[in-house]
Amino acid sequence: MRRKLVAGNWKMNGNLAANSALLNELVAALGHAAPCDVAVCVPAPYLAQCQHQLADTVVSWGGQDLSAHEAGAYTGEVSATMLADFGSHYAVVGHSERRAMHGESNALVAQKTLRALRSGLIPIICVGETLAEREAGQTTEVVGEQLKAVLAVLEAADLTRLVVAYEPVWAIGTGKTATPAMAQEVHATLRALLAGQDAVAAAGTRILYGGSMKPDNARELMAMPDIDGGLIGGAALKSADFLAIIAASGAQ
Ligand code: PEP
């Protein structure tokens, strides 16, 4: 049985005061026992705030990206060990906004994944097709190539320590959500690819859905057999919505 994970991706939003209120509301509402694993992936400047406010709570935290390099002359980049220094558990890798706006290739995403794993972070590896790719019948091929590039650089033991997030690009921030059946079909394909590396480990790998997951669709999405939680953008910025999604993870 895979424990579900609901992770918020704040993107480039927040400020000290708003974050403080949001984190306090989450911690107060969840108490000592959440129905799933919970995390917030925040802009790097706010990692220290998370470490301060979330230590010894049920909410973990992490970054939204990391450098493929270990250290050195890479102005503006944030390394895996820096994320870990601030107590991060997770790092989002290969988000479609980074792939589209920063030209991140499958090979670069693979290197970042490796860097996260070797620094003790759990990478949340995002894959997903654009609307044009879906309409051209290329979904399986596109997400398959994205995941295979990562699997090519990993060792079998790594499969137990990573999270995959299926995020159809056309559903991110648009209010359009994949139906549970559409998402399940892709999740099953991704799990089959993972199983090709190691069937036992793949049975334990969490595959999240992301793309306009909201309180009113979270329950039916997370009821699907291969949907092990959510990567949440917009709805993670409002404590009531994020908490409702977390509650839906336990209502299966
Ligand atoms: C995301 O950015 O990972 C995401 C899923 O965003 P939203 O929930 O806003 O669609």
Image (cartoon, rainbow, N blue to C red):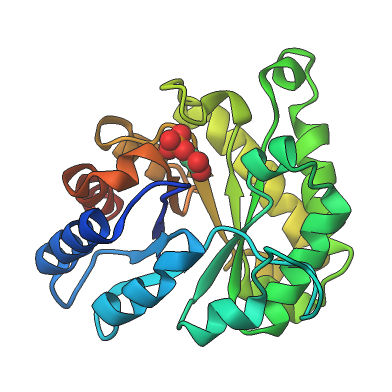
Q: Quadrant of residue 138?
A: top right
Say whether residue 124 is left or right of residue 156: left
Identify the residue at horizontal 32%, vertical 47% (top origin). 236
Mark yes or no: residue 228 visible.
yes
Identify the residue at horizontal 45%, vertical 83% (top origin). 87
Q: As rendered, which of 86 and 134 lies closer to the eye?
A: 86
Say whether residue 199 is left or right of residue 3: right
Q: Quadrant of residue 113?
A: bottom right
Identify the residue at horizontal 48%, vertical 77% (top origin). 88
x%, y% of residue 36?
32, 64
Q: As rendered, which of 140 and 48 lies closer to the eye?
A: 48
Mark yes or no: residue 196 visible.
no
Above-or-below relation of 82 to 166:
below
Count the marks: how many? 0
Above-or-below relation of 151 to 105:
below
x%, y% of residue 90?
52, 70
The quadrant of the image that shows the N terminus is bottom left
Identify the residue at horizontal 72%, vertical 13% (top origin). 135
x%, y% of residue 96?
65, 40
Q: Quadrant of residue 114?
A: bottom right
Q: As rendered, which of 52 and 224 lies closer to the eye?
A: 52
